[in-house]
Amino acid sequence: MKRTLAAVAVAGLAILGGAMPAGAAVPAGQLCPDWDTGRVNVADGVGSITLEAPEGMVITATCVKAGSANQGLGAEITYYDPGVTSVTIWHTSGKNLSHYSVMYGPGYPTS
C-alpha cells in the first residue's frame, strides 16, 4: 500500500512537471493516512511536535489532524521535496493536535 501511494505521488509529480504544493488539504474530516508511522495519537494539550527521521532516512510527508471535522479541522498534509531530517509540525488552525503520521524515504541531508 505504501509503495502504491508513493508511486501515485511520483506519477503526480510527472504530470505536474515536478511541482507539488508545499501543503495539500485532504477532504474535511479525513483521518491522516496510515503511513510509515501509522497514526500516532498525541497527548492532550500538545500544539506542536518536532519529528526526527531515522538514520539514513528523510521525512517526505507529514499529516496532522486537530479537533473534529465538524469544526473544519480535518487532516492537513505537507510534502517535503527534498526530504528533511527534522521538522516541527502543527495544525494551521493553531488547535492542539489529535494525531499525526509521517512518510519516510531513503536519504541523507543535502547540506
Image (cartoon, rainbow, N blue to C red):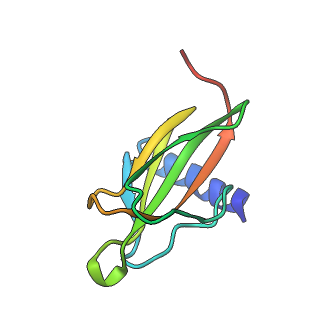
Q: Count the numbered circles shown.
A: 0
Residue in the picture at 73% in, 30% down: 56
Q: Quadrant of residue 106?
A: top right
Give the image quarter of residue 97.
bottom left
Relative side of 74 to 103, left or right: left
Q: Position of residue 21 (x, y in %)?
A: 37, 48
Near-viewer residue (4 or 59): 59
Q: Position of residue 67 (x, y in %)?
A: 36, 73
Q: Is residue 40 above or below residue 72?
A: above
Q: Percent from the top left, x then y, of residue 30?
A: 46, 76
Extreme residue in the bottom direction: 70
Which one is nearer the viewer's eye here, 103 or 91? 91
Q: Nearer the viewer, residue 67 or 83?
A: 67
Residue displayed at 30% across by 84% down = 70
Q: Is residue 96 above or below residue 106?
A: below
Residue at the image point whose x is 57% and y is 67% from the top: 33
Location of residue 110 with respect to 35 vertically, above or below: above
Q: Is residue 85 visible?
A: yes
x and y percentages locating residue 20 in the rendered image: 42, 47
